[in-house]
Amino acid sequence: MSLTFVKPLEIQRPYKSFRFDVYSLKAGRRMTLYGKAALCQWLELEANSEVTAICERPLLIPDSKPKRVIDFWALEGGVSTFYLLLRNGEIGGSFPLKLAYTDFCSWVAAERGRIKEIAIDVFESRRVRLDNFLVIVEHLVSHKGQVTPELIDRFAAELPHDFSLGQAELLLLDVDPMLARAAIFHLLSRGSLHCPSLDEAPLTPTTRLARV
C-alpha cells in the first residue's frame, strides 16, 4: 500500500498548545500530541475496532501557505484515511488553503485513500465517551504484555450473552480481576462486545456489556 505512514513530521509545537505524551497500541510506540482535539481524536482512533494502524502528523498539505499538517493517518477498514481537525466554519474546505487542499484531495482520491474532516467542536458533546475511552486505553497499556491472546480467547468462550463488568472480573477464579478487566476491554475495543451505556455513563462494575 502506497499511503502508509509510521513516523510523524517533526513540527514546532503550536503556540500555547497543550502537549500530551501517550502510548499508542495501534502504532506500537509513544506519541506526542499537541492540543486537546488531537488527544480526543487519538482516543477515538484507538477505540475504533476498524482501525488497525495510526500515525500522528503524517505529512503537510503540499504548497499550503501557511503550512498545514494533516492531523492523523489511519488504516481504517483497510483504507488509508487522513484526518483533518477543523473548526465548524472550516468544514468543506472553506479555510485559507482551498486550492492546495483541493489538489491534495485529488491526490488522495487517485491513491484510493480518503479524507475525513472532523469538527473539533463535537468532542465536547462526547466527553463521557472520551473519558471512558481514556480509561480503556490506559488499562490496556498498563497491562500490555500480561493479557495474552489465550486469556482473551478464554473470556470470549466463557462470557455469557449479557453481563456486568464486575461479573466478568470474577468469571475466571484463577485470573486477577484487573487482568480480567483488561481482557474484557480488549474484546470491547476489537468489536466483539457492545457497551450500550458507553456514551452516557462512566464505566463502573455495574456497567452492562453484551456479545455482538
Image (tube, rainbow, N blue to C red):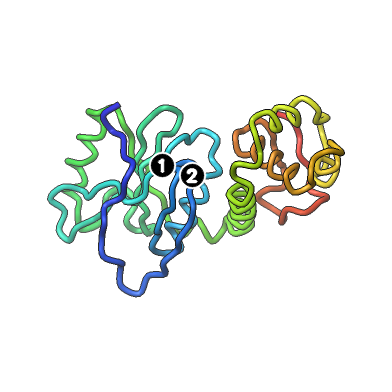
In the displayed orientation, state which residue is furthest to the bottom: 16
Q: Which type of secondary structure does the marked residue at label 2 adopt? A: helix
Image: 87 above or below 103: below
Q: Which mark is residue 195?
A: none
Q: In the image, what residue type sits under mark 1?
A: Ile
Q: Which residue is rendered at x = 32% and y = 56% of the image?
A: 90
Q: Which residue is rendered at x = 30% and y = 67% of the image?
A: 14
Q: Which residue is rendered at x = 72% and y = 44% of the image?
A: 179
x, y percent for residue 155: 75, 31
Q: In the image, what residue type sits under mark 2?
A: Leu
Q: CA distance from mark 1 to mark 2?
A: 8 Å
Q: Which residue is mark 2?
A: 45
Q: Which mark is residue 54?
A: 1
Q: Quadrant of the C terminus?
A: top right
> Do the numbered discs 1 and 2 sit on residues whose CB atoms are within 8 Å?
yes
Q: Nearer the viewer, residue 146 or 161?
A: 146
Estimate how packed mark 1 is, as few (under 14), some (14 to 19) or many (20 or more) residues with alpha carbons within 10 Å: many
Q: Is residue 92 left or right of residue 188?
A: left
Image: 99 above or below 155: below
x, y percent for residue 123: 51, 57
Q: Quadrant of the N terminus?
A: top left
Q: Is residue 169 left or right of residue 150?
A: right
